Amino acid sequence: KLFLMDHNSNTPSADRMN
């Protein structure tokens, strides 16, 4: 959920999940 939104924001947390 949060990571999904972060991914759009191109955040470091999302990058890690990606």
Image (spheres, helix red, strand yellow):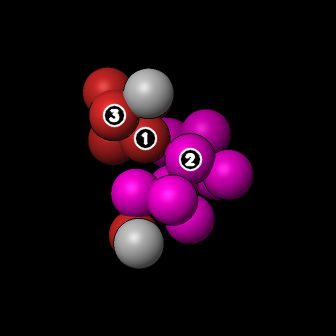
Q: In this view, does 17 lie above or below 6?
A: above
Pointers 1 and 3 in contact (C-beta within 8 Å): yes
Pointers 2 and 3 in contact (C-beta within 8 Å): yes
Q: Closest to the observer: 17 or 13?
A: 17
What residue is pinned by disc 3? 17
Q: What residue type is labelled 1?
A: Ala
Where is residue 17, by image quadrant?
A: top left
Q: In this view, does 6 lie above or below 11?
A: below
Mostly what secondary structure, the magenta segment?
helix
What residue is pinned by disc 2? 7
- Camera sees residue 12: no
Q: Is mark 3 on a helix, strand or loop?
A: helix
Pointers 1 and 2 in contact (C-beta within 8 Å): yes
Give the image location of residue 11, x and y in percent: 49, 42
Give the image location of residue 16, x and y in percent: 32, 27
**Distance from the alpha carbon under mark 1 to that under mark 3:** 5 Å
Q: Neighbour class for label 3 at 10 Å: few (<14), some, many (≥20)?
A: few
Which residue corresponds to the image point at 67% horizontal and 51% vertical from the top-left? 8
Give the image location of residue 13, x and y in percent: 33, 41
**Distance from the alpha carbon under mark 1 to that under mark 2:** 5 Å
